[in-house]
Amino acid sequence: MLKWAVELGQFDLEYMPRTAIKGQVLADFLLEFDSAVDDKALVMLHPLHDEESLEKFPHPWWILHIDGTVNYGGAGAGIVLVSSERHHLMNAIHFKFYATNNDAEYEALINGLKITLEMEVRNLIARSDSELVVNQMNERFQARGSRTELYLRCTQRLIGIFKKVRLECVPREKNSNTDALVKMGSQQEAVLLGSIPLEIQEIPNIPEIEVMQVDGALKETWMAPILA
């Protein structure tokens, strides 16, 4: 929405809120279908891909665009799920917990995968502008740090449920829709989001790292005079 606000700012446009859709409209729409027709399955339209043909897979392919960020307003994630029929499902998430930029990128990917699984998708192309996350998931970069390893294992478990998943790194300009969503989600701009849902996530998707505490008083060592 921020992107369109900039692009359309030069025109004299007036915003008109959408009126409520009456239930009778939905009923009339359903009556237009012939009840005798049994073939009402989802039309399988595969997204364009340069690497190889996707016709050999029986399930339709969906595309998941994700982005996560941390700024002065907080941390958040933007998710855009494109169905095989080119329908766009958008979601913004605000994180109430401390997160780094890499944590936010992983949280966006994990939440996007969970939403996709709820839609019973089996073939997925996930696109992110984070080279670090994509390369770590594709085993080109090594995951360092216990927190990153937890995120990596959690993401791998979710990917293992799908039939086929491809993770691709895209330039930021090709991820502009999620970039606008994540900015509004991190700052909790629910008014600007309009009909796009804004979720509040209280805790991360990974368990907290346990820190071992040492009980008892410190013994006298050569460091005691320095500490004193």
Image: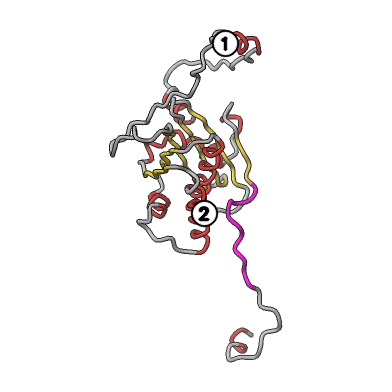
Q: Quadrant of residue 167?
A: top left
Q: CA distance from mark 2 to mark 1?
A: 47 Å
Q: Is residue 142 left or right of residue 75?
A: left
Nearer to us in this view, 55 or 99: 55
Q: Secondary structure at mark 2?
A: loop
Q: Quadrant of residue 200?
A: top right
Stretch in magenta = 202-212
Vertical side of 31 occupied by 108: above or below: below
Q: Residues within 10 Å of mark 1 (few under 14, many from 20)?
A: few
User: Label 2 sits on what residue type?
Assistant: Thr
Pointer 2: what residue? 100
Residue 15 lies, in percent from the top left, at 54, 17
Query: Does residue 208 belong to the magenta stretch?
Result: yes
Q: Secondary structure at mark 1?
A: helix
Nearer to us in this view, 144 or 114: 114
Q: Please report the residue visible at 65 percent of the width from the left and 48 percent of the height from the top.
A: 202
Residue 13 lies, in percent from the top left, at 48, 16
Query: Does residue 79 belong to the magenta stretch?
Result: no
Pointer 1: what residue? 29
